[in-house]
Image: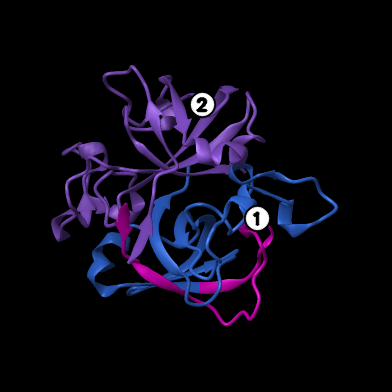
Chain colours: A blue, B purple
């Protein structure tokens, strides 16, 4: 087993978020724990970043989730879970590419958010 | 704390792998646990996939790793860890974009590998 601890949390006023960052215009903030402040000092406005997060409200994965209808659309044929971005997956890890709009202290303002308020952030990486 | 369990392991003969998938031509295989076999059925040769993995041989992270020289090159100024792909990070999670060359049973053959033999795989997602 691998144990991870969040480095921060998502903060957003949006009551609903799109299913994918590719179609999202939602704004929000990544509030990073103070102890990691120095780790975000090279992140600048205008940049794209990869954010790895925990689908913390997903139901536990069961073998019936191994194939799923894309976006829950029953009209579309089921695909293997590893070809989908569904939050119902063996390890409930999400990945989004967000655009940084501002950085102040330990708070990174972003757009194209597809995570709900309170989502635990596990990692941030440069986008390539 | 968030607990994750590998869905499979990397298999490669390469004694050394490049630091990044962006410059790698190394070939290898993703050997997925049999219980997830149905989950990979929509992955096909020629496709690019996002692979999330565990940097299982990284030393524990300490606050001195919050800033690091890119690629360990002392001539380059230190950057914040969240702007680097370094394996030394608060949560030792890696992300690579690999190209699928073949799929047979529970084994996905890939190229542009930057993970060492035995690396635990946590998730596979479609590349967008």
Q: Which chain carries label 1?
A: A
**Residue position marked by numbered label 2 in the rendering:** B107
Q: What stretch is highlighted in magenta?
A: A1-28
| Residue A26 on the magenta segment | yes
**Residue A116, x across and y down, in percent:** 56, 73
Q: Which chain carries label 2?
A: B
Q: Residue at x 54, y 41 (%)?
A: B36
Q: Can residue B127 be seen in this view?
A: no
- Determine which of the numbered discs, if any, sits on residue A22 in the image: 1
Residue A57 placement, left or right of A7: right
Q: Can residue A2 be seen in this view?
A: yes
Which quadrant: the N terminus of chain B?
Answer: bottom left
**Residue B105, x across and y down, in percent:** 57, 25
Res A19 → quadrant: bottom right
In depth, the one of B10 and A119 nearer the eye is: B10
Q: Residue at x 35, y 52 (%)?
A: B83
**Helix, strand, or loop for circle 1?**
helix
Which quadrant: the C terminus of chain B?
Answer: top right
> Which mark's residue is nearer the viewer, 1 or 2?
2
**Helix, strand, or loop for circle 2?**
strand
């Amino acid at each position: 087993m691998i144990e991870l601890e969040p480095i921060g949390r998502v903060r957003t006023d949006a009551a609903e978020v799109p299913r994918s960052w590719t179609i999202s215009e939602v704004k929000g903030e990544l509030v990073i724990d103070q102890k990691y402040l120095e780790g975000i000092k090279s992140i600048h406005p205008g940049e794209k970043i990869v954010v790895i997060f925990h689908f913390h409200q997903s139901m536990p994965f069961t073998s019936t989730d191994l194939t799923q209808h894309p976006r829950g659309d029953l009209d579309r044929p089921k695909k293997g879970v590893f070809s989908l971005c569904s939050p119902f997956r063996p390890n409930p890890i999400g990945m989004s590419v967000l655009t940084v709009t501002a950085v102040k202290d330990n708070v990174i303002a972003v757009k194209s958010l597809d995570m709900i308020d309170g989502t635990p952030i596990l990692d941030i990486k440069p986008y390539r």
